[in-house]
Amino acid sequence: MLIFISFVFMVGAILAFVYSVKSGEADHADRLALMPFREEEKK
């Protein structure tokens, strides 16, 4: 029974991951990763 529940959770996680990748929710993450948190002081 425990193995079956673990399998259901694993399949659900994989399906959620595939759905989020196909829907393009994480497209903005690439741009945010390259942007600085704050403006650097120019001396």
Image (cartoon, rainbow, N blue to C red):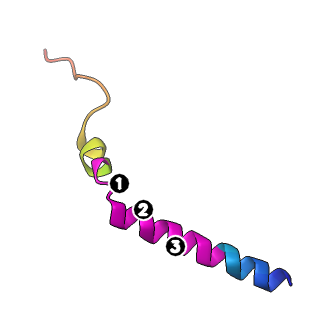
Q: Nearer the viewer, mark 1 or mark 3?
A: 3
| Chain part drawn in magenta | 10-28
Residue 2 point in image, percent of width and height = 84, 81
Inter-mark Cα distance, 1 to 3: 16 Å
Q: Secondary structure at mark 2?
A: helix
Residue 32 point in image, percent of width and height = 29, 42
Q: Quadrant of residue 21?
A: bottom left
Residue 17 point in image, percent of width and height = 48, 67
Inter-mark Cα distance, 3 to 2: 9 Å
- The C terminus - image quarter: top left
Dot 3 surroundings within 10 Å: few (below 14), some, or many (20 or more)? Answer: few
Q: Which mark is residue 3?
A: none
Residue 10 falls left or right of residue 36 = right
Identify the residue at image location x=86%, y=84%: 1
Residue 42 falls left or right of residue 35 = left
Q: Quadrant of residue 8?
A: bottom right
- Residue at the extreme left: 43
Q: Secondary structure at mark 1?
A: loop
Residue 42's place in the image compared with 12, above or below, is above
Which sits earlier in the primary sequence, circle 2 or circle 1? 2
Q: Is residue 17 magenta?
A: yes
Dot 2 surroundings within 10 Å: few (below 14), some, or many (20 or more)? Answer: few
Q: In the rendered image, which residue does mark 1 sit on?
A: 26
Q: In the rendered image, which residue does mark 2 sit on?
A: 20
Q: Nearer the viewer, mark 2 or mark 1?
A: 2
Q: Is residue 31 magenta?
A: no
Identify the residue at image location x=70%, y=82%: 7
- Residue at the extreme top: 43
- What's the amino acid at mark 1? Ala
- What's the amino acid at mark 3? Leu
Q: In the rendered image, which residue does mark 3 sit on?
A: 15
Which sits earlier in the primary sequence, circle 3 or circle 2? 3
